[in-house]
Amino acid sequence: MFIYSKSNQRRLIVIFVLLTMILALGFVASSIRENNSTSQTGSATDDTNQTPVANTDAIETKIDQVIATMTIEEKVAQLFVVTPEALTGYDRVTIASDVTKTALEQYPVGGLVYFDENIVSEDQITTMLANVQSYAQEIEGMNLFTCIDEEGGMVARIANNPAFDVESFANMNTVKTAAQAANIGATIGAYLSRYGFNLDFAPVADVITNQDNTVVIERSFGSDPETVSSLALEVFKGLDQAGVLATYKHFPGHGATSIDTHEGYAYTNKNFEELSESELIPFADAVENQVPLIMVSHISLPAVTGDNVPSSLSSKIIGGILQDELGYQGMIITDSLSMGAITNYYTSAQAAIAAIQAGNDLLLMPENFEEAYQGVIEAVENGEISIDRIETSLRKIVKTKLNLTQAN
């Protein structure tokens, strides 16, 4: 029997206080464990969040390893995207056989671009691209950029070929809604990926500010920069989701010109402020959305640069505006260097050297590939172009290719 005396009451109070303290200490200990657990979980979460950094470190190490094994000739070759005809010396290429493999061993170019004459049927193009990639893997350990102009509308090498059963689209100036643009990107991305293409020279991000324009007026999404930007982004997203690299073109905006750079010199007298209010808006948005490639046109901007040098060969346009002003860090590719705006004024070697010095990472279709290639090698050997400059572009190219290879 327990007798409730005053001393016992005091004992009870002491016991109660002790029990309360024990419970409180237990709660504190539990909280500490929980906090430690949360901290550890947070660390794990942080580690998870840091995974891209770890992956980035691993990718950077891999890039270093790939570049370290390359000769100067191999490094320079990676900067070129050419036709299979320019690579092999054949008049028309519709298969990839030992001739292609031998040519790639001699000139391990960064990419090949295919046109109407190379595309016969679904089975043919699928087999050809699969063979090309197997050669590239064997020779360089990376995929090639397999490129095509498939904008939709009037420029569509696949959709405009009656041998292919794919959806075709009207010209881009008829596209009015985001849903339409998204469908174009997703549809084109799906069939290009199925056939083996991994890089599309699309979308056209030119804003039509000159109604006398004959080059891109039907290929552009219109004259309102915000509309052009939003629709181009939808096409980009569709291609991206299909694993196809998109290329915004034609920086800094071909919609202000009336002359076709395929034929010769083309220019606009707009200054930087005027361009910023219109032509540059889609490209600025492209930079924010981290598009993988931007193609630079050959139009001249004398009011911006103070000279008539084509944008594709101008460090003021590429380094000054695209990279410094807009902050673009992705791959930069020239428009075709076989166009009159280039060939009328520069040799293939001169154009290739100037394009690299201006900040381009990829050189598209020089008029004479071998001359351009040898010209760049000689420029590296005589110090006109530093090996560091070549490797700056090469790092972007190799990183993109390693990601493509992993995705496949």
Image (tube, rainbow, N blue to C red):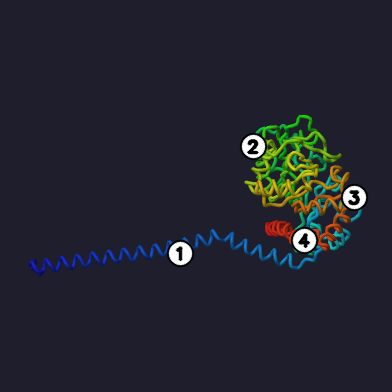
The answer to whether mark 2 and mark 3 are in CB contact below 8 A is: no
Q: Position of residue 326 (x, y in %)?
A: 65, 46
- Amino acid type of disc 2? Ala
Which one is nearer the viewer's eye here, 52 or 408? 52
* Residue 237 lies in quadrant: top right
Of labels 4 and 1, earlier in sequence is: 1
Total marks in image: 4
* Separation (CA) of disc 2 from disc 3: 38 Å
Left-right relation of 379 to 1: right
Q: Nearer the viewer, residue 275 or 205?
A: 275
Q: Could you say whether the residue bearing mark 4 is in a helix, strand or loop?
A: loop
Instruction: From the image, state whether disc 4 or disc 2 is nearer to you.
Output: 4
The residue under label 1 is 40
The disc, 1 or 2, on the residue closer to the chain's N-terminal end is 1
Residue matched to label 3 = 92
Residue type at tag 4? Ser
Q: CA distance from mark 4 to mark 1?
A: 47 Å
Provide the residue designation for mark 2. Answer: 179
Position in image of residue 366 (x %, y %):
85, 50
* Nearer to us in this view, 349 or 396: 349
Whichever of callouts 4 and 2 sits on the residue coming sooner in the sequence is: 2
* Residue under pointer 4: 386
Answer with left or right where residue 385 lies relative to residue 35.
right
Q: Residue at x 75, y 54 (%)?
A: 361
Residues marked 3 and 1 touching at CB (< 8 Å)? no
Q: Nearer the viewer, mark 4 or mark 1?
A: 4
